[in-house]
Amino acid sequence: MAQITLARYFLDRLADLGIDCVFGVPGDYDLNFLDAILEHPTVRWIGCVNELNAAYAADGWARTSGRPACLMTVFGVGELSAMNGIAGCFAESVPIIHLVGKPALSIQNRRATVHHCMSPGRYDQTAKMFEPVSVAQALITSIHDNHGRTAAQEIDRVIKVCIQKSKPVYISLPFDLVLAEISSESLKEKISMQSVQKELIGVQVNQGTAVHVVEAIVDMYKRSSHPCILVDFGVIRFHLREQVEQLIEAGNLPFFTTPLGKGALDEDHPNFRGVYFGAVTQQYIREQMDSCDSQIQIGPLNSDLNTGGFSHKMPKEKIIELHSDMVKIQHGEYPSVNFHSVLPLLIKAISALPKKEGKKAKRLNQNFKVEGQHDEMVKQDAFWAAVPNILQDGDTILVDAGTCSFGILEVKMPRNVTVCSQVLWGSIGFAGGATLGAALAAKSQGRRCILFTGEGAWQETIQDLSTIIRLGLSPILFVINNDGYTVERLLRGPNQSYNDVPVWDWQNALSFMGAKEGSYRTYSIKTAGQLQQLFDDKTFLAAEQIQLVEVFMGKHDAPRTLKEQCEMVARANAGKP
């Protein structure tokens, strides 16, 4: 049997899955592993400026590529710096393989207190801190452990769980085991996204219960005059697009998406009715949802911002929820089945029934030109209404928390887009950091990458703009400059100093970060006329080089959706209904 290093085994497993990069920041306990990356034929190292940004970049890469991303940090200081990014991935079910370089076993065994330790001689504290934000851990301390498991088997185990659960996993590897040699025999059995999903999901499913569940769903479906489908984030994370489209076609069913499900299915589909999030939803979309008398929710996550402050009106008795680990029908729960097992049977059953007579979709006439007088300041609602004018099929779109994440919700998307937005975790600055990974994945797919962020948000994570420039990536970067944290002003303190941010010279941000003259473009947009001129510029739309667009907007101006949502949040924070 051929012998290879443990590092090479791990990297070859990444390559099996189509993972061609590892994000992170160098640290002394992982430098020999970084040497192994540099020697690998397909996996490359993407060095970031700090670990939080590296975690965000991995998040953006995973969302855009549809595969797990790999993050490498050093024990203690590095891994804890990345924890907020990993927690966001856990909350929003983004698969991340987090590899941590630890001190050599010879150091650990004598319980020496070395740099990056929190307590004398303790090496397990940080791993324990990551338990709540990871679904599997492999703390590798030998090539063969006392239970007969090999290091290779442990690596394979956690990678498979990462794919099946679509959440972060944690692997720690001591410095002196990185180059230890093991058998390459296990690599003969390739790991793929499809094979792992079939292997692990199939074990958990009770087929008898699946049949019973489908019969119950079909019974509700038959009794319903106007059923509909609500498409949520689980459709994106678990790659259910094709099956959900088949279900929609089988029954001629109208469908809505949630904020977290934005972009899950094409919005030019004749059965698409709009983005639904309770009372914040546009009236014409709410009216169509209210006319439905049953609802199949696929991959739902019922958080406050995803449901308009929990203002969905559909009663529990008329709701079916299909999750990755259970199915809920009205008030009953079935933990032994999931949407993977139920959807194929449900599609077959619905296809055998007469199609429902769908109501004609109500759609607003959308004018993608920038509204407003030629020389007046750009308004938030006018900006977002015009954004579809610049979007193309296949775009990757990143939006940061606040005005951008709510403004994008009513933007009509072209086909096959990827929308990266932290609707649940809501970490300000996420999108700016995630742009590195998203732009990297988008470039390999021949797609454009567009960031929408606020000037306050990006100040938190802008350091890796320099890495984007160094790698020769060419995203379009929109910076909404509205003089501070507008979302916070809407919640409390419209003129309080704690919602102010430093004034930056954004027009020189690219050159300051290392972009060479002639390799980039910047734009300063202060009027509606200037914005329309930019949106009509074919050179700008071609996105052949990195471009930064600074758009000035009013300090207290915000999209309609954000204003209404903030009213709900403010009332909830004050303990009011």
Image: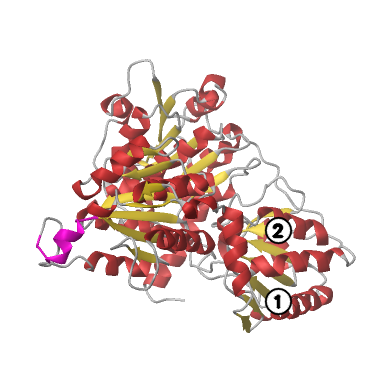
Residue 445 covered by magenta stretch: no
Q: Amino acid at mark 2?
A: Val
Which structural element holds mark 2? helix
Instruction: Write down the region rendered in magenta.
Output: 102-113
**What crowding class fits label 2: few (fewer than 14 Cα within 10 Å), some (14-19), or many (20 or more)?**
many
Q: Amino acid at mark 1?
A: Gln
Q: Which residue is mark 1?
A: 207
Compared with 450, 279 (above or below) is below
Q: Position of residue 294 (x, y in %)?
A: 73, 72
Which structural element holds mark 1? helix
Relative horizontal placement of residue 333, taking residue 517 as reference (left or right):
right
**What crowding class fits label 1: few (fewer than 14 Cα within 10 Å), some (14-19), or many (20 or more)?**
some
Relative horizontal placement of residue 144, taking residue 344 as reference (left or right):
left
Compared with 134, 10 (above or below) is above
What residue is rendered at 88% in x and 66% in y? 352
Q: Residue furthest top?
A: 518
Q: Tag on residue 489?
A: none
The answer to whether residue 55 is visible is: no
The answer to whether residue 54 is visible is: yes
Residue 107 covered by magenta stretch: yes
Q: Position of residue 509 (x, y in %)?
A: 30, 29
Q: Tell me how many marks there are.
A: 2
Q: Which residue is mark 2?
A: 244
Q: Nearer the viewer, residue 167 or 376?
A: 167
Q: Nearer the viewer, residue 185 or 451?
A: 185
Q: Are marks 1 and 2 in contact (CB under 8 Å)?
A: no
